Amino acid sequence: MQASPRRSDIFAPGSRATRPPLTRARLALGTALLGLGLLMGPATAQESGTPAAAGTPEWRHGLSLMGQPKYPAGFKHFDYVNPDAPKTGLLRLSVDGTFDSLNDIVPRGTPAGGLQLIYDTLMASAFDEVATEYGLLAEAVSYPADYSSVSYRLRPEAKWHDGQPVTAEDVVWSFEQLTKNNPRQAYYYSHVKKAEVTGEREVTFTFDQAGNRELPQIVGQIRVMPKHWWTGTNANGKPRDISQGMLEVPLGSGPYKVKQVTPGRAISFERVPDYWGKDLPVNIGTNNFAEQRYEYFRDGTVELEAFKGDQYDFRVETSAKDWATAYNFPAVKAGKVILEEFPDRASGSMQAFIPNLRRTKFQDQRVRRALNYALDFDGMNRTLFFGQYKRTASFFQNTELASSGLPQGLELEILESVKDKVPASVFTQPYQNPPDGGEEVRRANLREAAKLLREAGYEVKGGKLVNAQGEPLTIEILLANPAFERVALFYKPTLERLGITVNIRQVDVSQYINRLRARDFDMIITGWGQSLSPGNEQRDFWSTAAADREGSGNYAGIKDAGIDALIEKVIYATSRDELVAATRALDRVLLAHDYVIPTWNYPNTRTARWNRFSHPEKLPQYSFGFPDIWWWDAQKAAQTGGTQ
């Protein structure tokens, strides 16, 4: 299931400060996900008590995919927040790159970071539960026993920042515009057959199928936008067009509104003092900063130096080299800057070199496996990463969903049901990356890579690896993040020893995104974030239907009947055990095809912050909650320096 975004999502595309604890979706067009469990929970005793009569809607305050929601109807606030947190202070964040639009609905241009701060969704998620949502714009939700539709009842007090009410018409219009103008969202919500107003404050979404337990909860993630504003005119009398980028400040309903914009360089948001939802249980103890500001940097080195110079407050460090070498400066020694790692318990991921299977040269599995043998991960880890990383060996790394050993029990049954569509090796041979070790192992790996390439019809002529038609094997590695250049440069000489011509192409973020959308690349370095409750988004990642769809998460161009079948097993699993087994089976088959060259993983999020902030003593299990539940600490700020 795709994450129901709370406001930790303020970290912008390409930002160093990524949404904890998950990955950045925008720069790599990836998807970060959060959740656990499978069964949609029954209503609490306060809500129903007895089963609803036929035809009578059963309204609930929350939804869970793993039984009952933790918090009952009428709860005061989440357990992990400080309800008395001060509402003051300035939070300064950094973002890589630039922006040219304040419309992040359409996949055109580069939108500014933090725009989700100005909008509300129907439901909001909790950081101490998985795949559980509670009412935000919606005060109640109802769905039939077969999950063929879902209805949301809006809160009467919900208002836009101009004072007009949030209406059911706004919800329907938002859904229509989102799915009309954003191909990826259209695909994600493709099973919603119809959205319609069914009451004064009620909207109903009808699905094209029954039994898909995720769909009611997925709909709760929809961002609601003001129809009256978007269908109106701007200050120059020109009709607004939601399908185009713009720099006009949009109207929202959320806890913040845009304060100031310097196109391409900075954007700031100020808390709305009379925000309609400030006293809702899901919002108590959150949105504590009076202002949140984003500064943009085009160069990562400059961005790091700006942090050291106290130009912004909080940084997620994604570079092992910088984490090991760049934080030995006076403010750290004086305790003014705090270095802290937070465990990532809510997600798994696969980061990898991803060849584009739409290119003929990568369609032979032996070529892809040879590229894996050519990656000297042990040397890369020692040389570039100070030995901090482990090799990734699962698309659901570091979770119970990762496959291991040989399939057994329910997983074996699931694989047997699609036996004619999956590689025979999944039943007899666990996936393993090539061995790591010293020079002898590295040479043996290169010999195996050369052997596989010969078997695939390549031979070396004049120092170049060519196919039977005499065409050289060339690979362009497309990059947008300068930090990955040294990774690609480390890989390049080994590939060249095999006779492969390698070019490394560094482009700006906008060009990178456009080339990914157009599938105009040989190889990229990126990945997929995974939740603990995978579901409908797996179609976007791996399915045949998504392979040639512009903007999908199927970067590799995977088209495989066995994988398509296993995705459906995941989506329609009817118990947690079945979900885990189906996901392990999917993972096992993805690995067996050698679609990617896995790189590294790290189980924690590395952070650095100027010591001006505090957080609840006990953080929630599935996120460290920054900045949602943190606050400005005046005493610390006075000792550290800096103003509100």
Image (spheres, rainbow, N blue to C red):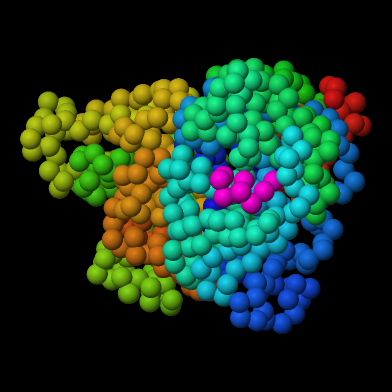
Q: Main secondary structure of the magenta part?
A: helix
Horizontal side, residue 237 vs residue 208: left or right: right
Magenta region includes residue 170: yes
Which quadrant holds residue 398?
bottom right
Horizontal side, residue 322 vs residue 643: left or right: left
Horizontal side, residue 554 vs residue 453: left or right: right
Q: Is residue 597 visible?
A: no
Q: Is residue 509 visible?
A: yes
In the image, residue 380 sits, relative to residue 212, either above or below, namely: above
Residue 118 lies, in percent from the top left, at 69, 36
Q: Quadrant of the C terminus?
A: top right
Q: So how many labels did they put on this image?
A: 0
Magenta region includes residue 212: no
Start-end of magenta stretch? 166-174
In the image, residue 585 sits, relative to residue 257, either above or below, namely: below
Query: Which residue is drawn at the image coordinates 87% and 43% (left, top)?
Result: 85
Query: Which residue is drawn at the image coordinates 28% and 61% (left, top)?
Result: 561
